[in-house]
Image (spheres, rainbow, N blue to C red):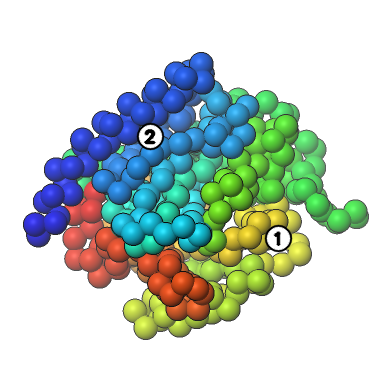
Amino acid sequence: MKCFFGRRAAVPFFAALLLAAVAAAAAAQGQARNPAFDAALAEQRPGPAVSRVGALSDYVPSLAGTALDSPVYFIEPGAPSPGIPAILILGGTHGNEPAGIVTASLFISWARPVSARVIVVPRANASGATWPDPDRPGPEYIVVPGASGERRFRYGSRLTKPGDEIAADPDVFYPQGTPAGAKGLAGGEARNLNRCYPGDAAGSLTSRAAAAITALIGRERVGAAFDLHEAGPSSGLAWDIVAHPKNIEYAAMGILAAADRGVNMVLDQSREEHRGLSHREWGEGTAAAAYLIETLNMGQVAGGNPAFDQLGDKKAPLWKRVGIQIETIQAILQAHSETDEPAGWAAIEGLPGIEALQHDFSKYF
Ligand SMILES: [Zn+2]
């Protein structure tokens, strides 16, 4: 309890320091920050282990001032050790998949890595958070009554807002590296961040954001990268881990470890037809082990359901979806810690597990 109260009191102080640092960095670049960037910042309550807030534009400078720039949080380990790779947690690729966004924000508030630096991008597509999905609109916000006050997480779209993008949608979109003769995607998918990897630093803004994330993985020497998503009830993807073949054994070990804690996930493998998706392109083009995690969003249905109770739905309440995302990440990291050298490198303390979230969800916000 002593530790808990100590953290609580510290959070606003650290948050104020960090916001001042971000403002100074933006001023030094001579760039006004985009409102989408500020909105992404305002959702977070950084814990004392957060040492710095950077931006995707640190990796692709032409993103500065655009709605595709987004905050990047650096969480320092208690016992830093040279040579230990970093861990990347990416939420908000799709703005209408709140469990991944909320999971990323709990990392920012609570994660205390033992040896590895943890890097969190809670709103990978900051523009996607700013407008309702035209096909599947939801509530404007998800409101969590929290211990630090009311927390609001915007419920957005899976695509970049059209007015934020500098490139017109093509008639047909072909992710980078699509083989000749292969079927393309609907033109609007050019604004789907998770079809734009590895990205193009001189391309559309959505593609530049993808390029920034790919560059971050390389420059920060990320060893394990997690892209957090949700799927609607008809997609068949919910409760799924998609892993790149090079690291699928860790995911298989993680599924067994998660099952020991009552969390049952299905394992899927990244394939050639997944061109442009995070798990495939991070796995192919970087040194990181690449994982995508999907939980179930019952509100993500054709036509949308703004009245759906994202927080308290009986089948898939938010505490359960977030708890499963955290337990799944921890189970896969446990596999890395037990298999790789040095032992224990990927351990993260301080995060609530599913039981703690079920017992008292509000306490962690
Ligand atoms: Zn998604």
Name the residue at 77% across, 48% down: 176
Q: Residues within 10 Å of mark 2 (few under 14, many from 20)?
A: many
Q: Is residue 274 left or right of residue 2?
A: right
The image's mark for residue 41 is 2
| Position above or below: 348 against 259 | above
Q: Earlier in the sequence, mark 1 or mark 2?
A: 2
Residue 170 image position (x, y, % from top left)? 78, 36
- Quadrant housing residue 235: bottom right
Element type at marker 2?
A: helix
Residue 59 image position (x, y, % from top left)? 59, 37
Query: 229 or 3, which lies in front?
Result: 3
Q: Quadrant of the N terminus?
A: bottom left
Q: CA separation, marks 1 and 2?
A: 31 Å
Name the residue at 63% across, 27% down: 62
Please say whether residue 119 is visible from this viewpoint. yes
| Position above or below: 139 against 166 | below
Question: CB of residue at label 1: within 8 Å of ligand 1?
Answer: no
Element type at marker 1?
A: helix
Q: Is residue 187 left or right of residue 59?
A: right
Q: Which residue is mark 1?
A: 284
Q: Are marks 1 and 2 in contact (CB under 8 Å)?
A: no
Q: Amino acid at mark 1?
A: Glu
Please say whether residue 264 is visible from this viewpoint. no
Q: Is residue 267 left or right of residue 177?
A: left
Query: 130 or 259, which lies in front?
Result: 259
Name the residue at 53% across, 69% down: 240
Residue 124 image position (x, y, % from top left)? 51, 43
